[in-house]
Structure formats: C-alpha cells, structure tokens
Image (cartoon, rainbow, N blue to C red):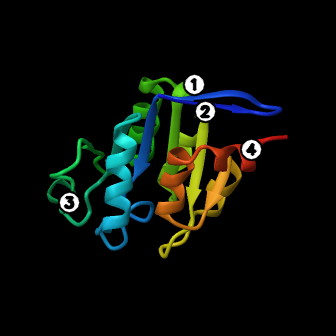
Amino acid sequence: MIEIDIPGRGRLLIENAVFDVNGTLAEDGVINEAVLSRLKELAALVNVYLLTADTYGTIRSQLEALPVEPVIVNPPGEREQKADFVFRLGLDRVAVFGNGANDFAMFEGAALGVAVLGPEGCFTGLLTAAHIVVPSPVSALELLLKPKRLIAALRY
C-alpha cells in the first residue's frame, strides 16, 4: 500500500492501481520497456490491474514476466465494465489511469484519477474528472513510485 499525506487534503491511501491499456499504457497495442519496468516496480507496492479489450491481441504475451494479470473487458459496455470493476475494489483506495471516453465512469469517486495525454490524445471530458493530467504513461506510473510528485500537484 502507498500512503501519502497531502497538505490541505489529508491522507491518500492507494491499495489498487487500475490502468486502461491502449492509449494509456500502450501505443498501437505495444507497451514499451520503460512502462513495463515501472509496472513491475509498482506491482511490488500495490495491486495492479490492467483493463483492456485487447484490441491487438497482444496483452498476455507482453505481460509474461510481470506479476500483473490483465482483465479483459468486452464490447459493448466497456465503460460500465471498467466502472464496476473499480467499484468492487473500493473507491476510497484506488487510483485509476486512463485516456478515453470509456474510462470516464471509473474516475467517478476514485481516490485518485490520472488522465494520460499520450500520442492517441485524451477524451476532453476525462480532463474534468481527473485529479491530475500527465503527458505520458511513464509520468503516470512515477506519480505512485515517487509520491512527492503527488504532494506537489495536489496540496492546497
């Protein structure tokens, strides 16, 4: 678990980290080595879940060396499936990461919501639901790996 005291906000407890895959962690279905190594590091601290429709059919082979299991969401209803998954984990101890319109519902009520603005862009509605917007998946992962970055962005 990651515990962070944020001045003016209180204590943030993160037990679970939930990531959309395509557009958030992966570009064109490929998760690069820098992201994979940080996912492995993060998995030693919290439960890591990757939610994906596996559009490219490559997710399992990319995660073979990691202690992370993908959760496949099937169209239609990806938005609802993602939100239900996050809700079942418990909103008060979950950090969510995404970039698309189908990620919006899982941001509602999450302890921490991070929008990732990568090469595929980011759904503008997600920007208003997020606590923080970052320019890359590495930046997103490092928010939890280097929690003082969260303090700098979220303190009052």
Decide which of tag 2 and tag 4 comes sooner along the chain. 2
Cα separation between marks 2 and 4:
12 Å
Q: Residues within 10 Å of mark 1 (few under 14, many from 20)?
A: some
Residue 102 in percent (x, y) is at: 47, 52
- Rendered position, 106 above or below 1: below
What's the amino acid at mark 3? Gln
Decide which of tag 4 and tag 3 comes sooner along the chain. 3
Q: Quadrant of residue 71?
A: top left
- The residue labelled by disc 4 is 154
- The residue labelled by disc 1 is 92
- Rendered position, 32 above or below 54: below
Cα separation between marks 3 and 1:
30 Å
Residue occupying image coordinates x 50% and y 59%: 100
Locate residue 146 relative to residue 1 in the image: left or right. Answer: right
- Is residue 77 something that shows in the picture? no
Circle 1/circle 4 CB separation < 8 Å = no
Circle 4/circle 3 CB separation < 8 Å = no
Residue 35 in percent (x, y) is at: 37, 61
Cα separation between marks 2 and 3:
28 Å
Q: Quadrant of residue 88?
A: top left
- The residue labelled by disc 3 is 62
- The residue labelled by disc 2 is 111
